[in-house]
Image: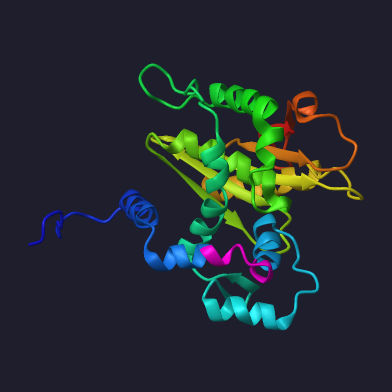
Amino acid sequence: MPEGRERTRPITAELLLQAKERLIQRRETHLDQLADKLRENRVRQIIEPMLAGNALGAVPADDIQYLLDLGLCRMDPAGGLVIANPIYREVLPRVLASATVASLPHIAATWLTPDGRLDLPRLLQAFLAFWRQHGQPLLGSAPYHEIAPHLVLMAFLHRVVNAGGALEREYAIGSGRMDLCLRYRDVMLGIEIKVWRDGESDPLAEGLAQLDGYLDGLGLPTGWLVIFDRRAGQPPISQRTRTELANTPAGRTVTVIRG
């Protein structure tokens, strides 16, 4: 029997997550080649709104067919254009965040307890301090402008999970959001990301309702709703970033981060 292969060992969800992570970190050749395509404008104009949860708009049919031919996307009879498979759903935002990850300053792991457990209140304070100090300059390191805040947040969270956790993402055309699930040992955190743009109303109420649905699926009693304010004329990030507690329609008390 080849080394490391143990056929009697049960396959658990944790083992599948570990296998997925090893596959992504190996950066197989075809994954790198697909990642290079993200720099092409005809790819970006489709992938960027998909990651942001926005509608595609007036995209040429030839460009959609191009992504289908590349194998980046597929047509889902129940939901239109979607990312081709779960591995690509994970790889695409991670590759886009790689430049931001490389630009991160040194961040002390103040979110860990002395015995190495994740402390969510400490994590919240660490992110707020990071975002106030570094958020504005790091936005420029993100290759896709529309989801620059998402990529900076993911870069920070990748720093958190590097010591032994995982970060999972969910997004879909027209949903108006991106969902993140941070797993670290026995701690799980569900995060919903919304963007407040010019001409739109405050997405708080919609975000709270959507977060309810996401937390239901994760089986969690609470989570974070992150609202990035991209409207023109706002104060600097260091001044406008704040938190508050809010109740979801289902009665959950969650943390709202406005940045």
Outermost residue on the left side: it is 1
Would you say residue 56 is visible in this rendering? Answer: yes
Which scheme is used to colour this image of the protein? rainbow
In the picture shown, does residue 198 fall above or below 34?
above
Of residues 56 and 252, the one drawn nearer to the viewer in this rendering:
56
> Picture quarter containing residue 241?
top right
Location of the N terminus by quadrant is bottom left
Residue 44 sits in quarter: bottom right
| Magenta region includes residue 33 | no
Residue beneath the point at 32% across and 55% down:
19
Query: Could you tell me residue 52's position as x and y percent?
Result: 69, 55
Compared with 70, 255 (above or below) is: above
The structure residue drawn at horizontal position 37% and vertical position 37%, both measured from the top left corner, is: 164
Q: Is residue 229 left or right of residue 63?
A: right
Residue 21 vertical placement versus 182 (above, below): below
Magenta segment, which residues?
36-43
Q: Position of residue 48 (x, y in %)?
A: 68, 60
- Magenta stretch, main secondary structure, is helix
Question: Residue 131, percent across and down?
Answer: 66, 30
Look at the image and tell me whether residue 79 can be seen: no
Q: Position of residue 63 (x, y in %)?
A: 68, 78
- Quadrant in which the C terminus is drawn: top right
Q: Is 124 placed above or below 143 here?
A: above
Question: How many numbered discs sit on the rendered protein?
Answer: 0
